[in-house]
Image (cartoon, grey):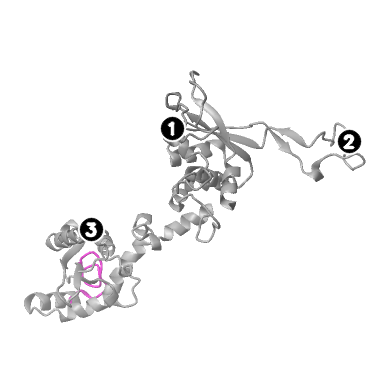
């Protein structure tokens, strides 16, 4: 039996239990488990031919109201496919659309004559009815859609709400798509605030995060934005600006990460240049930049300050692989506070790395 999963022991255990005690399983539970076991086959209700579906579906012709959802399960042998007989839904029975005497006729032929001809003929008609009945339920269940990630409809639905539907993101992006979907509640809000960004980054990186707003910095002015004598708008106290830069406090913020251990601290550093660079070096900084870009869409300038725990500040020694200006402190550091000397412009480092 090819289940398509490679876990034959688990598959056989479930099939044996379903055949031995079918009354212990709910209809949706059993159908979902069977769909997962035969992952190489089409989903229930989507096959073009009944032969493409791993299990034949039918209904036990009974006159009583169904005490259980599933009547029986036969694993099949050789060319004979497996068969699942249900009780809760179908053409037969007191809840079925067929006249009750047809249910009685099919039941009598099956019980007293051992002749399943009429029952199997009706099963030819209702096999797809039962499969579509399950498919209608499964399409509205996000967790069932996740059973087959390549065919996950809710991933497209949720992604469309936050701008990550298929084809929405172009170019390099180091943030996993599922991480964005997990934070769809935060990313889907129209208001983007500091608390939301801090919560998002803290949950993704699993480190303490604090956002410092209104960080002052010098903003360079372009040639057309500077004041020149004789030009329109060069009025003192109204539109004239002295110099090639201005002090700005409203368009920049700072992300504080930490206190961090030395391993986490080094993980947020930019990738080193040269042939000895590790494959994953600079990955967390790239993820940080991509998160901020996606959350703010480039509306603000920002930088990141790394806080290294004071008890993990490494001593400086030649040949230890320390990086000058990033993981080196001359002498013995005696300050009682954590080391927060390093402030990085993540956008500049990541852009330079990707262009190179």
Q: CA distance from mark 3 to mark 2?
A: 80 Å
Residue bearing mark 1: 262
Q: Please say if 285 is above or below 150.
A: above
**Residue 260 or residue 251, whichever sits in front:** 260
Where on the picture, by quarter, is residue 118?
A: bottom left
Q: CA distance from mark 1 to mark 2?
A: 54 Å
Q: Earlier in the sequence, mark 3 or mark 1?
A: 3
Secondary structure that dominates the magenta span: loop
Q: Please say if 221 is above or below 36.
A: above
Q: Position of residue 155 (x, y in %)?
A: 44, 57
Horizontal side of 214 relative to 30 (left or right) equals right
Q: Position of residue 197 (x, y in %)?
A: 53, 39
Residue bearing mark 3: 26
Q: Earlier in the sequence, mark 1 or mark 2?
A: 2
Residue 240 part of the magenta-drawn span:
no
Q: Is residue 227 visible?
A: yes
- Of tags 3 and 2, the one toward the viewer is 2
Q: Is residue 64 visible?
A: no
- Of tags 1 and 2, the one toward the viewer is 1
Residue 210 badge: none
Classify mark 1: helix, strand or loop: helix
Say which residue appears at 47% left-offset and 31% top-offset: 318
Horizontal side of 294 relative to 94 (left or right) equals right
- Of tags 3 and 1, the one toward the viewer is 1
Classify mark 3: helix, strand or loop: loop
Horizontal side of 26 relative to 158 (left or right) equals left
Q: Earlier in the sequence, mark 3 or mark 2?
A: 3
Residue bearing mark 2: 235
């Amino acid at each position: 039996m090819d289940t398509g999963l490679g876990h034959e022991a688990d598959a056989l255990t479930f099939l044996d239990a379903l055949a031995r005690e079918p009354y212990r399983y709910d209809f949706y539970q059993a159908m979902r488990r069977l769909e997962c076991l035969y992952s190489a086959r089409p989903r229930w209700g989507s096959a073009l031919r009944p032969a493409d579906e791993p299990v034949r579906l039918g209904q036990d012709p009974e006159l009583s109201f169904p005490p259980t959802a599933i009547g029986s399960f036969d694993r099949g042998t050789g060319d004979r496919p497996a068969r699942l007989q249900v009780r809760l839904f179908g053409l037969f029975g007191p809840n079925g659309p067929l006249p009750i005497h047809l249910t009685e006729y099919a039941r009598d032929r099956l019980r007293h004559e051992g002749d399943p001809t009429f029952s199997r003929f009706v099963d030819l008609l209702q096999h797809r009815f039962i499969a579509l009945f399950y498919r209608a339920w499964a399409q509205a269940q996000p967790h069932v859609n996740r059973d087959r990630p390549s065919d996950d409809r809710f991933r497209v639905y949720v992604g469309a709400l936050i701008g990550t539907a298929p084809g929405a993101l172009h170019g390099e992006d180091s943030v996993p798509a599922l991480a964005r979907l997990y934070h769809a509640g935060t990313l889907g809000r129209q208001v983007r605030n500091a608390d939301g960004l801090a919560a998002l980054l803290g949950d993704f990186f699993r480190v303490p995060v604090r956002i410092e707003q209104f960080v002052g910095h010098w903003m360079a002015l372009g040639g057309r934005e500077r004041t020149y004598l004789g030009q329109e708008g060069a009025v003192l106290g109204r539109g004239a600006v002295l110099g090639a830069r201005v002090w700005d406090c409203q368009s920049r913020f700072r992300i504080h990460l930490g206190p961090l251990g030395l391993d986490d601290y080094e993980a947020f550093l930019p990738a080193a240049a040269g042939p000895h660079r590790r494959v994953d070096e600079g990955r967390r900084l790239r993820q940080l930049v991509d998160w901020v870009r996606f959350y703010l869409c480039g509306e603000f300038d920002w930088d990141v300050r790394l806080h290294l725990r004071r008890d993990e500040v490494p001593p400086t020694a030649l040949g230890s692989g320390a990086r000058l200006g990033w993981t080196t402190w001359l002498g013995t550091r005696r300050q009682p506070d954590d080391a927060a000397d390093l402030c990085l412009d993540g956008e500049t480092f990541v852009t330079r790395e990707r262009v190179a």
